[in-house]
């Protein structure tokens, strides 16, 4: 299955400040040149109802929302990454194998735990949706299919809060009527070329001779389109492991300069990070800390270890060492603390992803 969070950045803003729910919420990348210069990153569905779209100039979005009480906010990637990590931790626990493919989406292999039964998979997907809603107040859309390609197209079928299950014998009747733009890897340019060739639906593409496609798009892409239009895809769900670091941040019960109190919190953070590492079978080689002080200054320190390790005690000890030193150097009380590990190693998986050569579909991830 493919899980994609609905209107992610804007939804993250809604959970941070529930008072804005129900109003149009527009998350913006301000260029800083003049007050409203820049583009819309994303918006909630209320704003979309007024015609606001990702990538639109902020000025244009403001015009569409002229007579409405709308909320415009700047992007806050640090915060979205933190929400994303929490989401992925929840989702990962429901998967045989788990591959995060963007800040707000991931593939979950569920064949084993559902015995390959699509009705059980539908049930599992509903459980995952309910869990995200209950635990993090977030809605997502899930597509379930016999492979990555079909599940991804299925996830886009009903949004927001959708759940679309496509069984193997429904693949062609599902795909063929869809506009070619819905196929993964067909961006604006490819869509235009295909329209010029008289290809409008995925079914039109499937009818085309493979040699014709290869002549036009090259062997790799031509073959891909030939297979993809029929819903054929054998790209496996692979554990991501591309993350360069994992980190966790938490606020202390009270501002403090006391090492014991800080370590109480960082030990928890270490345990959480360690759980993620264990799930992904990763060892680490570097440990870092970050301290957000009462006066809003931020300090970070890190240490590279002698050897690769997966030992949580070594993680905790290193954090203790780093904090002890930092507290001796800095006077202010600490408000928030963070732990970060990096330098991961695991079994090699050199293979390139099937889809890595494709033109990104709709406005790729930043
Ligand atoms: N994003 C962006 N600019 C774009 C597209 C996306 O900054 N042109 C960012 C903001 C989105 C996030 O990436 O919240 C995820 O992108 P999606 O394409 O999944 O779009 P959303 O999650 O916002 O909406 P949807 O409900 O359609 O998935
Ligand atoms: Ca999304
Ligand atoms: Ca997405």
Image (cartoon, rainbow, N blue to C red):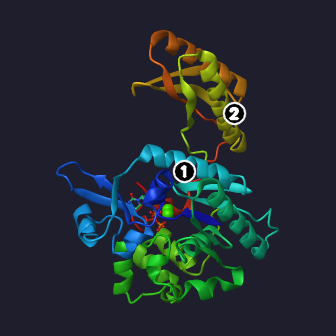
Which quarter is ligand 1 in?
A: bottom left
Residue 167 horizontal side relative to residue 291, left or right: right
Q: CB under 8 Å between callouts 1 and 2? A: no
Task: Identify the residue at image location x=63%, y=36%.
Answer: 345
Does any portion of residue 151 appear in the rendered image? yes
Which residue sits furthest top?
328
Question: Which residue position holds label 1?
Answer: 84
Question: Which residue position holds label 2?
Answer: 271
Q: Nearer the viewer, residue 8 or 284?
A: 8
**Which quadrant would the N terminus be assigned to in this image?**
bottom right
Where on the picture, by quarter, is residue 146?
bottom right
Task: Identify the residue at image location x=33%, y=64%.
Answer: 70
Image coordinates for residue 88, horizontal then vertical, percent: 61, 51
Dot label at residue 113? none
Measured Cα–Cα span from mark 1 to mark 2: 19 Å
Q: Nearer the viewer, residue 160 or 303?
A: 160
Marks counted in the figure total 2
Residue 166 horizontal side relative to residue 255, left or right: right
């Amino acid at each position: 299955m493919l899980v994609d969070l609905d209107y992610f950045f804007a939804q993250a803003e809604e959970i941070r400040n529930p008072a804005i729910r129900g109003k149009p919420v527009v998350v913006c990348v301000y260029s800083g040149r003049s007050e409203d210069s820049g583009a819309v990153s994303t918006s909630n569905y209320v704003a979309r109802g007024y015609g606001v779209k990702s990538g639109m100039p902020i000025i244009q979005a403001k015009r569409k929302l002229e007579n409405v009480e709308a909320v415009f906010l700047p992007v806050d990637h640090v915060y979205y990454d933190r929400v994303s990590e929490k989401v992925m931790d929840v989702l990962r626990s429901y998967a045989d194998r788990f591959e995060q493919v963007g800040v707000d989406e991931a593939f979950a292999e569920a064949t084993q735990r559902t015995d390959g039964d699509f009705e059980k998979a539908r049930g599992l997907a509903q459980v995952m949706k309910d869990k995200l809603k209950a635990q993090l107040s977030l809605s997502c859309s899930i597509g379930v299919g016999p492979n990555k390609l079909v599940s991804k197209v299925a996830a886009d079928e009903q949004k927001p809060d959708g759940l679309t299950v496509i069984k193997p014998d429904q693949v062609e009747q599902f795909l063929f009527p869809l506009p070619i733009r819905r196929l993964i890897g067909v961006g604006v340019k490819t869509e235009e070329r295909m329209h010029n060739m008289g290809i409008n639906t995925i079914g039109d593409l499937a009818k085309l001779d493979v040699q014709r496609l290869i002549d036009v798009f090259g062997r790799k892409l031509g073959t891909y389109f030939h297979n993809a239009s029929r819903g054929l895809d054998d790209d496996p769900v692979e554990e991501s492991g591309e993350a360069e670091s994992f980190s966790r941040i938490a606020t202390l019960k009270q501002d403090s300069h006391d090492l014991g109190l800080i370590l109480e919190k960082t030990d928890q953070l270490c345990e959480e990070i360690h759980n993620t590492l264990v799930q992904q079978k990763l060892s680490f080689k570097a440990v870092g800390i970050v301290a957000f002080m009462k006066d809003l200054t931020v300090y970070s320190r890190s240490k590279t270890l002698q050897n690769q390790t997966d030992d949580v005690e070594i993680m905790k000890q290193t954090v203790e060492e780093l904090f002890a030193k930092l507290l001796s150097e800095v006077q202010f009380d600490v408000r928030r603390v963070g732990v970060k590990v990096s330098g991961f190693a695991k079994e090699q998986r050199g293979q390139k992803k099937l889809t890595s050569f494709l033109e990104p579909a709709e406005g790729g991830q930043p």
